[in-house]
């Protein structure tokens, strides 16, 4: 239940702290005093879209804070899962600034608006006079059926199954689209792979082949170079003969010229090696036009592939081949995943259909008793000749709510055919229908705080008395807060708050005060007779409060 509501710089409220009691609380005040500001402030806590126009004229920020007793709601695991500190007395705050920023906090920890909505929707429900529009919504009507029939767990189970089926179906559709797109490219990619395989990159080193082709293409010139090199080293009167002569001369003085001897000996050995290697190369050098053509063709094909695929070397070509192979493997994996998902979606479809049919059967069985309970409550609210029924029909497709659609039919008078409730009922009748539904829903959905904004619109006299009694009865099991203009309703409150508006420093301000027993009698009398309160009005007010 809501323990404390604190509002700062919000519309006409400068700063206010309201302490709420358990049971039934009524809020009254002159028209325009600011009663609905309390509801709008609570709407902000419920995660509704912020209107920055409500920020007070003398401030750059507005805040709304509530302290809520959450001990009986089983929320400890939710707090832990969302890394929030848990306290039985939970503090929830929303702040908005003139810069257009909105922030939400739970126990002083900043939270996303989605988390705030999830939490507060399980703690507080606000019903305004405009919520009767919900009766036009068939989804809301089906929720009413499920809630009153005690089928919310089955409804959520089906919704979870539906979300899983929806996700699997979307993935299956996406994979099938990918397979179609890949299939359109597969022939071309296979051609590319075959074209690149012909290069045999793992077998040939094309850099070495290029060197070999250079040698073969210049064989005659190389032969001349090698022959001249060999002749210069080893022919008569060559460098080799001169070195041998000088080495012999130096050997006579090797103790004095040992370093020169060693170096000359090394040069002589190296030249002999060069002469021998040049001879070997000369003997192995071949002129092979067919091999030249073969290497030329291979290197031309290799260079074409480099240019075609914008690669710089063989490593990049290999990486491109690996990418093509990976695409092929991915396609195979996609086909396997598609087959697996097809089976999964088929199984999920069957399970979803089974759950939807079971839920339909339970709904169908529960509706007659539910209709009787609602009609009984409406009779207490002075709608004695009312008839109300839920017309349940099945659809061809299954949605998150199952295979059913429901329409609430209503007739307020004997002999009048039943039609959709929002077409048949007057404003006062719709308010009473919603009050009856909210009364029953509160028992089933474990809400501990319900805020009614003028639920008694369009009623008076004995009907108003019955509305007050119903709200009072609801307050025996939960916290009920109601804004009202009717003395019959105000008289039934266990706590009575009054909203007052006065001018302060040239600015209209609203404040909230809790009335004493004497003040409650006077306020109830005012609601009955206006600003002029006489003894008869006071006596009637006491009688109403004691009835």
Image (tube, rainbow, N blue to C red):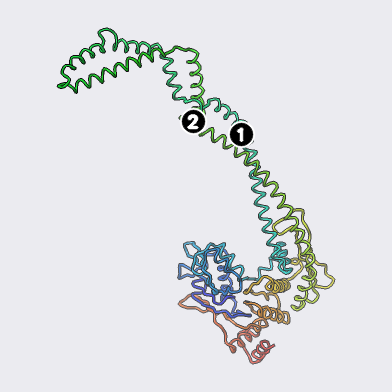
Looking at the image, which residue sits at the far top? 236
* Residue denoted by label 2: 310
Say left or right for 40 vs 338.
left
* Residue 335 percent across, percent down from the top left: 65, 41
Above or below, comparing residue 135 to residue 535 in the picture: above
Q: Which mark is residue 338?
A: none
Query: Where does the image place residue 379, in percent across and percent down from the top left?
Result: 77, 77
Q: Secondary structure at mark 1?
A: helix
- The one of 498 and 272 positioned closer to us in this rendering: 272
Placement of the N terminus among the 4 image quadrants:
bottom right
Image point 70% across, 87% down: which residue?
547
* Residue at the (59%, 65%) spot, across then down: 118
Circle 2: is it few (<14), some (14-19), or many (20+) Cα within 10 Å? few
> Judging from the image, what secondary structure is the residue with disc 2 in?
loop
Residue 532 visible in the shown view? no
**Disc marking residue 185:** 1
Q: Position of residue 452 (x, y in %)?
A: 64, 74
* Quadrant hosting residue 281: top left
């Amino acid at each position: 239940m809501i323990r404390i509501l604190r509002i700062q710089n919000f519309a006409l409220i400068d700063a206010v702290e309201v302490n709420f009691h358990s049971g039934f609380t009524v809020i009254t005040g002159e028209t325009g005093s600011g009663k609905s500001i309390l509801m709008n402030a609570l709407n902000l806590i419920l995660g509704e879209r912020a209107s920055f126009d409500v920020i007070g004229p003398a401030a750059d920020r507005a805040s709304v804070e509530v302290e809520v007793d959450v001990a009986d709601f089983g929320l400890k695991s939710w707090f832990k899962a969302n890394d929030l500190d848990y306290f039985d007395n939970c503090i929830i705050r929303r702040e908005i600034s003139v810069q257009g920023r909105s922030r939400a906090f739970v126990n002083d920890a900043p939270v996303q608006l989605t988390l705030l909505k999830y939490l507060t929707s399980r703690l507080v429900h606000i019903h305004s006079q405009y919520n009767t529009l919900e009766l036009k919504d068939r989804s809301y009507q089906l929720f009413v059926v499920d809630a009153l029939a005690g089928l919310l767990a089955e409804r959520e189970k089906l919704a979870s199954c539906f979300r899983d089926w929806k996700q699997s179906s979307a993935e299956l559709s996406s994979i099938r689209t990918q397979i179609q797109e890949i299939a359109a490219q597969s022939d071309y990619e296979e051609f590319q792979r075959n074209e690149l395989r012909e290069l045999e990159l793992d077998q040939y080193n094309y850099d070495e082949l290029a060197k070999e082709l250079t040698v073969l293409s210049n064989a005659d010139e190389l032969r001349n170079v090698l022959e001249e090199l060999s002749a210069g080293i080893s022919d008569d009167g060559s460098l080799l003969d001169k070195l041998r002569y000088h080495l012999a001369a130096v050997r006579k003085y090797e103790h004095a010229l040992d370093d020169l001897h060693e170096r000359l000996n090394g040069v002589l050995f190296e030249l002999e090696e060069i002469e021998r290697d040049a001879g070997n190369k000369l003997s192995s050098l071949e002129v092979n036009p067919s091999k030249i053509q073969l290497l030329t063709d291979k290197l031309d094909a290799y260079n074409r592939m480099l240019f075609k695929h914008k690669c710089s070397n063989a490593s990049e070509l290999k990486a491109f081949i690996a990418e093509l192979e990976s695409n092929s493997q991915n396609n195979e994996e996609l086909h396997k995943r598609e087959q697996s998902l097809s089976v999964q979606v088929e199984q999920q479809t069957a399970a979803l259909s089974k759950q939807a049919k079971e839920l339909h059967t339970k709904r169908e069985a529960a509706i007659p008793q539910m209709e009787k309970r609602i009609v009984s409550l409406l009779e207490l609210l002075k709608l004695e000749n009312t008839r109300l029924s839920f017309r349940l029909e099945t659809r061809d497709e299954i949605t998150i709510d199952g295979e059913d659609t429901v329409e609430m039919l209503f007739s307020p008078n004997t002999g009048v055919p039943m039609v959709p409730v929002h077409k048949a009922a007057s404003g006062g009748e719709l308010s009473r229908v919603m009050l009856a539904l909210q009364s029953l829903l509160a028992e089933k959905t474990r809400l501990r705080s319900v805020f009614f904004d003028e639920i008694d619109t369009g009623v008076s006299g004995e009907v108003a008395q019955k509305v007050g009694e119903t709200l009072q009865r609801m307050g025996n099991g939960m916290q009920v807060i109601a804004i009202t203009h009717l003395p019959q309703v105000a008289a039934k409150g266990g706590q009575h708050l009054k909203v007052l508006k006065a001018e302060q420093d040239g600015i209209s301000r609203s404040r909230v005060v809790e009335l004493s027993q004497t003040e409650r009698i006077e306020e109830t009398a005012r609601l009955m007779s206006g600003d002029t309160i006489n003894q008869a009005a006071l006596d009637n007010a006491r009688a109403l409060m004691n009835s």
